[in-house]
Every structure is written in C-alpha cells, then in structure tokens.
Image (cartoon, rainbow, N blue to C red):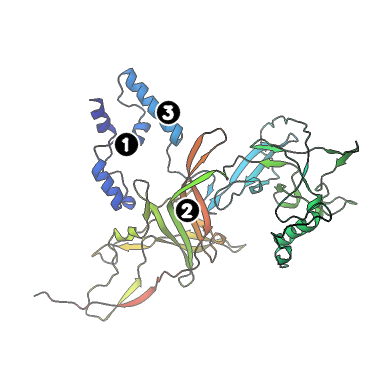
Amino acid sequence: MRELICVDSWALTDKELTPQEEDFEAVRFLRVCAGRAINGIALYRDKKPPAETKSEIQLLEKFRDWVRSVYGEAFSTSDAPAWRPERLEYGVEVAATTPHGARARFTAHPGCNGQFDWYAFDQQLENPPGDPEVPEPFRRSLLPVHVRFTGMPNARWWQFENGRMNISKIDNDPRELAKMAVSDFMLIQSNDWFMVPFTQPVGSLCAIDTLLVHDVFGGNTLIERADRKRCGPHAEEGEATERWTMFSTTLQEMDDRVADFFILPPSSVNATQDGEVIEEVRFMRDEMANMVWAIEHTLENGIGKPWAGHERSLTKAIREALLRSEAPLAYRLQNSVPEHWIPFLPVQIDKMRKEVALERAAMMHYGEGADEKEYELVRPSGRVLRPTGLPDPDLYQVREEEVSRAGTRISRLIRRSRWIDGSTHLWIARRKSAGGGEGLSGLHFDIAVETRPETIDE
C-alpha cells in the first residue's frame, strides 16, 4: 500500500520535459516510466511527505542523507557563482592570511580545462575585511641534492656522457624565449642548482624568512632572496634595478613586484576523470553577415544524455516562405538558418573607449502555413547561452575579444575526482577551448526568391 502512495505522490509524468528537451530518447523513456517510476528529486524536495510510522520517517531520512552524500546539498539549475558569462570563463576570488599575519585577497584565473594551480593566482592590492589568523612559524633542517634531468651535462669533469640527447640539434629561434631560457639553464647554470625536498600543506601559504646553509667546513652562510631587489619605478634610490624570480605570485597591476610567499591551492589537476560532453556551444564569426553565431552543437536532453543540436531543427517544421503565386519572384526580408544557430550582434557599450560587446539576439521561426506576421522567436535551449544571475535575463552580452577569428568552444562535461582523504567528488565543469575558425551561415536579407506556380485541383 505504501508503494502505491509513493508512486501516486511522486511518480514521473509525461509533462516532465520542456519543448526543447523532447527528443526521441527522452520521449521513449517517459512513455515507459511515466506513472510507473518514482521521481527521486520530487521525493527529496518534499518537505512534508506522507510518512506515518517511525520506520517510514527514518527510511526517508536515510534516503535524503544518501542523496546529499552523493549529489550534494541541493539540486539547482543555476550557474556556479564563479562562472562569468560575459567572459565565458571562471573567475574566482579567495581570501587568506599571509605568513606575515595580514589579510590578502587573491584572484584566480583557471586554465582552459577549469584547473587550478599556483600560477593561476594573483594577489590584489586591496585587502579583504576580517581578522587574520595567527601564522605558525617552524624550522626545518634539510639535505639539498643536485638538480637532475635528462640531457643534463655531467657535474664532474672528464666524465663521458651518453649520446641519447643531441644538444647540437636544438634550434633556438630568437622569438622562442622559453626554449632559450631552458637551453641556457641546461648548458650553463644547471650544475649550480640544488633541490630541497620540502613538503607544504595543501591549501596553505608559506614564506621562507631565513635560509641558512651549513657547509662541510662548519661554516654558516645566510642566503638572501633573489627577488628582494626591486626594479622599475618602485625601485628605491641607490638600489639595484635587476630582479630575478621564479615560482612567484604576481601582485595585480604591479608587474614589477611579486609576493614573497608560496601558495599551494587544493587542486585535483592530476586525478580527474572526464566523462562525456553533455553540452557544447561553438562560437563562430561570420564576416559576411557581420555577426557571431553561437552554434549549440550538443545539448542535454530530458534524461541527461547528449543530444545532437541539429536534431532540434528536425523536430519542428521550418518554412522557407515559398508561397504559391503567379509572380515569378517574391520578396523576402530574410531567409532561414538552422534553429540551433543563435545570433550575437555587435553593440557599442562604451562610446569613449569604443568598446564593443556581442549581444544575444534571436531569429524568427515561422510555423507551417503561417503568414509573415505569425512567428515566434527562436531561443537557445542549453544552459551556456541562458546564464542565470543576470539583471535582465533577456539581455546577455559577451565581450568581443572572447571570440577570436579562430572561434571559441564552451563545453559542459561530467568530472569525477578522488581527494586525499579518499572521498569521491562528482560535478559538471565547463571547459573553454579554441574553435574551428570562421564560418558561413548563408543568411541573407532583402532577397528575391523564385515562387511556385499556382496549380488548380481538378
């Protein structure tokens, strides 16, 4: 009897799908499961379920605990707070206490895969409010070792080297600064470098106050930081203007200064499994039409599976407006494009700086047999082109520099990772990558098309 109540109260219905999600696979699923299976999300969100006995209440609480442990605290279709729809990328701000006991704010710019590492963080000049934590000083005695890598010259004189790497084949172009720096380090300074095995806790900031070297003769030498010397306009009078630094956090808007501590963010960059792409939008420039197209190449259907975007156009009848007429030509304001092609038009947002943004527009869809005055606007179906949290949901703008001639590709995919405590985490991430170049939509305005001659039914 209780099973019948559960099915009647939280059963799946054939009204679960929106018109944009009605693909063949989702419709077939609901035809089989509607009225027979329980909607778990509705059961989880129901604040007053019809549970009478104590065992039933405990069973529902166990179900909610299991959902929270696997899927999180709440289900939401809203974008992540860190997602910046105008930039098509993540933007993160975090606050921390520096090793010197001061509060600091950091901005993070993750990579194209949404991955964080120490070089993704920049320190802002403005400090956040709040009381700083008390830093914990410590002392370590470590034994340094020589830096070793494949192809490195031997440290000892008159020692034969193997021929696995031909250094003379390295072709350094004057524009390849990274290759020149690596070659210089490999051939000249590599023997003078040491590596100290130091373990830093994850999610912490660490600064080296004093580095004291104790040699085999019993002497102690104090090693100063190489980046203590400032350069540029902030250099003090009488101080050297040369600076050398490596693995340092940059101070935002002050390229001549760096932070004197190391940051080790908690990142799952090396232990992430990527699943299938459930949504993909390709931004493409169309110079002939003087606009940008956002092509919904892959969409998420009603049951969470990938759905080819061009199949959306096949679910609706698209009329090309070729009416029967005695005239050989007919005037049309515009022709049609596939429904999964969403236009973005350039608009000026700053007259002084001449800044331009790409604003989301909409194409007109004419129904079968309708005249020119009966149409509906074609809206995007995916979540990438329908960001949440905007002041005006109908006004969505993307900065023009985010869509280059090569195009931009935004993907939503499932990711899974295991943390250092053994816990498993599952989430949907967004990945930004280069597109496939420019394209041609074939959109034309103010055109004359051939008409079909009228026929008389006998």
196 vs 410, left or right, is right
Q: Identify residue for label 2.
A: 411
Q: Is the Cβ of the residue at disc 3 closer than 8 Å to that at disc 2?
A: no
Secondary structure, mark 2, is strand
Quarter of the figure with residue 215: top right
286 vs 256, left or right, is left
Q: Nearer the viewer, residue 193 or 28?
A: 193
- The structure residue drawn at horizontal position 43% and vertical position 40%, both measured from the top left corner, is 76
117 relative to 445, above or below = above
354 vs 249, left or right, is left
- The structure residue drawn at horizontal position 39% and vertical position 25%, both measured from the top left corner, is 61
Q: Crowding near pointer 1: few (<14 within 10 Å), some, many (20+)? A: some
173 relative to 10, above or below = below
Secondary structure, mark 1, is loop
Work out whether residue 378 can be spotted.
yes
Residue 14 at x, y = what percent?
Answer: 26, 44
* Cα–Cα span, label 3 and label 1: 17 Å
What amino acid is labelled 3 in the image?
Asp
Q: Identify residue for label 3.
A: 65
Q: Quadrant of the N terminus?
A: top left
Residue 305 at x, y = what percent?
Answer: 37, 49
Work out whether residue 85 can be spotted.
no
What amino acid is labelled 2 in the image?
Ser
Q: Identify residue for label 1.
A: 39
What amino acid is labelled 1 in the image?
Asn
Dot placed on the residue nearer the N-terminal end, 3 or 1: 1
Q: Nearer the viewer, residue 321 or 136?
A: 136
Q: Quadrant of the C terminus?
A: bottom left
Secondary structure, mark 3, is helix
Residue 127 at x, y = what percent?
Answer: 69, 40
